[in-house]
Every structure is written in structure tokens, then in C-alpha cells.
Image (spheres, rainbow, N blue to C red):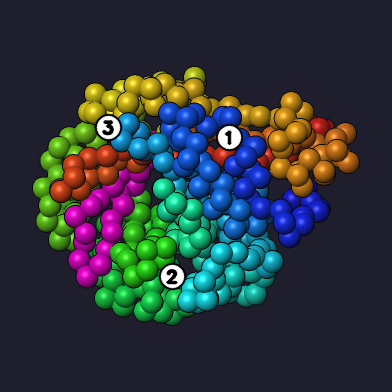
């Protein structure tokens, strides 16, 4: 209820959130140079977008201290004033499509979505063009196929090759019972790039079920060691989704997205077990494991007024008897990837969420 009454200036940017939590993001995960690029990237994003969760995507081994950035938009909210700065004219189709998806107009595609994620590939340089990750409400084969058709109609051949969407549709139709599509990724930041499918419900029977599905859809790379690692992780993981990159065929690189429902490692030892397995596999450094195990927590505006995002601080100062502003930190999920040419790698997705705490006792 507080979101709609915050007085926001056109100069207010999502970068204010990145600045507010900088001292909570360990240097061993994201160094200063990369973090500056995250801030510059977020300066092109409207402030109200960051009131939904945002994610920092970090490597778990010591090969990199760079990060990528994602913003999650709840599809049932009105983002009719949505604008991004930094877009070149050649990307006007993408901007128009994002505005249509997030705006107030009656959009058939939006009505089938639960979330819309904007993902920026930041790394060594600030990014201005996001990829789109669409989370269907149900993820059924029929709904996911409709979403594929509609988004291709909106974005056209510049971002989605018709052959890629046809192949993705074939894969979706071959999903076994009780499986679904968690996300459809349109990698618009990379021009004409693979579609990404994140598939849920293939882990119910463990390694054999997922392996059979990959065989069924024609994935032809050997990934025995990858699934051997997954088998060791599976007892500690609540949800495991399979991610695929799709062109005219299934690309060799695949991924497993691992979620543990209890986000606080102090209350759930599964975090330690999973990260320890990744460390023994050489996919996670000991220093980064320690930082992840201690990342969970929150900050209150009461102790941090000077660096708190301006619109939140202004509203709180006028209504401090009714509410208090918090930024909650957690690890959203882990991802392990396999590429026949490069081997395995692992990433963590750090989640920052803003909450208003009602001083009358409700959250």
C-alpha cells in the first residue's frame, strides 16, 4: 500500500538501491570496478522497478569478481510510466515491447505472465539493453506455446529467429506429465541469440528422468560427470530446474538451477552441504562459500538514513509512526552449468528485496 504513494522524481533511479547495499555485497563476490558498472547500469532503470526484487549474478569460483544484474517485475502491477534511458533508436522495437508488457494497456501476453525479468549482462562494462525472461502463470505446454508465438510477433526476426521458436515449441510439447516451463528467456541483449527454456518438474525421479528427457529431445553431448554431481546435490535441494539454450537445435551448454526454500543458512544446513560439494568439485572457492553462508540478513532505514534511497527516506520521515523501510538480503538460488568445451561452472544469485513493515504489526 505504500508503494503507490511514494513521490518519485524522474531523476530517481534504481541505482540508489545498489548504492544503499554496497557495503553488504562482499568484495570477494563483486569487486569495486564491477560494482561501479552495476550502478551505472541501474542508473538507466526507473526507481520503482527496483521496489520489486533484484538479483546480482556472481561466479562462485575465483575466476571472476564481476556480476550481472536482473530486475523482477510482477506482471499484475502497473508500470505504465516505464521508461529506460540509454536505448539507441535501433532498439526501439524492444523498448516498445517492454513498455507494452509492463504498461496498463490490455495485453494478452501480460495476462498470461506471473513475472517479467529484465536481465542485464554487465560484466566488465555497463549495459543498456536487457534480455527478457518471462515467467508464465502456469507454464503448461499450451500457455507457453502461446507466449512464444506472441513474443515473436512483438519482437520479430531481429530478436527471435522463427526456427528457434519452432524448436523451442517442439521441446515444450515433449515435456512429460507434471512438468512445466518455469521461464522463457529472450536474450535480446545479445542480438539474435538462442532462446532459453527453464523447465520445472524434471527432477522428481532424479538423474534418470532428466537424462531420459534430454535423450528424448535430441541432446547429444555426454554429461555423465555433470549428472553425477547433481545426484550428490539432489538430497539437499528442494527444487531443480533444467535450463536449455535453443537455436535450430539444442545448444551443448545446459544448466541446473538449484533452490533451497529456507533461505537462511543458519536455519538450514543444506546450504553448507551443497556449497561444500561445489567446493570439493572445484566450482566454489572457500572464501566465497563463507560469504554466501553469512549473506542472509536485513538492513533498516533507522540505522542507514544517509545512504537510503531518497524516495523511501522521504516517505518514511513523513510516516515513521506507520511504517519502517527494510532491505532484505538472501541467496535466491544457485546454478551449475555444463559446457562440453569448457566443463562445469557455478553461480550464485543474490537477492535484494524491499519491504515496508507496518508498525501496527503486519509485514
Q: Quadrant of residue 301?
A: top right
Instruction: Please report whichever mark, 3 or 1, sits nearer to the chain's N-terminal start.
Output: 1
Q: Residue at x 63, y 66 (%)?
A: 83
Question: Is residue 88 in sight in this rendering?
Answer: yes
Which residues are the magenta region?
238-257
Residue 273 coordinates in the image, percent (x, y): 33, 23
Dominant secondary-structure state across the stretch colored magenta: strand
Instruction: Please report whichever mark, 3 or 2, sits nearer to the chain's N-terminal start.
Output: 2
Secondary structure beneath disc 2?
Answer: helix
Left or right of 9: which side holds 208? left
For this rendering, which residue is in front, 216 or 197? 197
| Position of the C terminus by quadrant | top right
Cβ atoms at labels 3 and 1 below 8 Å apart: no
Q: Which residue is mark 3?
A: 283
Neighbours of disc 1 within 10 Å: few (<14), some (14-19), many (20+): some
Q: CA distance from mark 3 to mark 2?
A: 35 Å
Residue 236 coordinates in the image, percent (x, y): 34, 28
Q: From the viewer's perspective, is residue 285 above or below residue 20?
A: above
Q: From the viewer's perspective, is residue 74 above or below residue 210?
A: below
Cβ atoms at labels 1 and 2 below 8 Å apart: no
Q: Which mark is residue 147?
A: 2
For this rendering, which residue is in front, 220 or 316? 316
Left or right of 130: which side holds 39? right
Q: Which residue is mark 1?
A: 22
Total tally of numbered discs in the picture: 3
Amino acid at each position: 500500500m505504500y508503494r503507490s504513494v511514494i513521490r518519485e522524481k524522474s531523476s530517481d533511479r534504481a541505482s540508489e538501491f545498489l548504492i544503499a547495499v554496497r557495503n553488504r555485497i562482499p568484495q570477494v563476490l563483486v569487486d569495486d570496478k564491477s560494482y561501479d558498472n552495476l550502478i551505472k547500469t541501474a542508473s538507466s532503470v526507473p526507481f520503482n522497478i527496483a521496489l520489486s526484487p533484484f538479483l546480482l549474478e556472481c561466479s562462485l569460483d575465483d575466476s571472476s569478481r564481476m556480476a550481472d544484474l536482473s530486475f523482477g517485475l510482477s506482471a499484475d502491477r502497473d508500470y505504465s510510466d516505464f521508461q529506460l534511458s540509454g536505448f539507441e533508436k535501433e532498439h526501439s522495437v524492444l523498448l516498445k515491447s517492454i513498455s507494452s508488457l509492463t504498461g496498463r494497456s490490455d495485453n494478452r501476453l501480460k495476462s498470461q505472465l506471473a513475472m517479467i525479468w529484465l536481465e542485464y549482462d554487465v560484466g566488465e562494462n555497463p549495459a543498456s539493453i536487457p534480455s527478457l525472461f518471462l515467467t508464465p502463470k502456469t507454464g503448461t505446454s499450451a500457455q507457453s506455446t502461446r507466449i512464444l508465438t506472441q513474443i515473436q510477433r512483438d519482437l520479430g526476426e531481429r530478436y527471435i529467429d522463427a526456427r528457434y521458436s519452432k524448436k523451442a515449441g517442439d521441446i515444450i510439447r515433449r515435456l512429460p506429465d507434471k512438468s512445466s516451463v518455469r521461464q522463457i528467456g529472450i536474450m535480446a541483449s545479445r542480438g539474435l541469440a538462442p532462446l532459453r527454456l527453464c523447465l520445472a518438474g524434471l527432477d522428481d525421479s532424479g538423474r534418470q528422468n532428466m537424462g531420459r528427457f534430454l535423450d528424448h529431445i535430441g541432446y547429444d553431448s555426454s554429461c555423465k560427470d555433470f549428472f553425477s554431481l547433481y545426484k550428490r546435490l539432489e538430497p539437499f535441494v528442494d527444487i531443480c530446474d533444467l535450463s536449455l539454450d535453443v537455436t535450430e537445435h539444442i545448444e551443448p551448454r545446459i544448466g541446473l538451477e538449484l533452490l533451497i526454500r529456507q533461505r537462511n543458512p543458519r536455519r538450514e544446513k543444506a546450504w553448507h552441504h551443497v556449497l561444500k560439494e561445489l567446493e570439493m568439485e572445484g566450482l566454489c572457492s572457500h572464501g566465497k562459500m563463507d560469504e554466501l553462508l553469512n549473506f542472509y540478513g536485513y538492513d533498516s532505514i533507522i540505522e542507514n538514513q544517509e545512504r537510503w534511497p531518497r524516495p523511501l527516506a522521504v516517505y518514511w520521515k513523513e510516516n515513521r509512526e506507520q511504517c519502517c523501510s527494510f532491505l532484505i538480503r538472501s541467496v535466491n538460488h544457485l546454478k551449475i552449468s555444463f559446457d562440453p568445451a569448457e566443463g562445469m561452472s557455478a553461480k550464485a544469485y543474490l537477492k535484494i528485496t524491499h519491504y515496508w513493515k507496518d508498525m501496527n504489526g503486519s509485514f
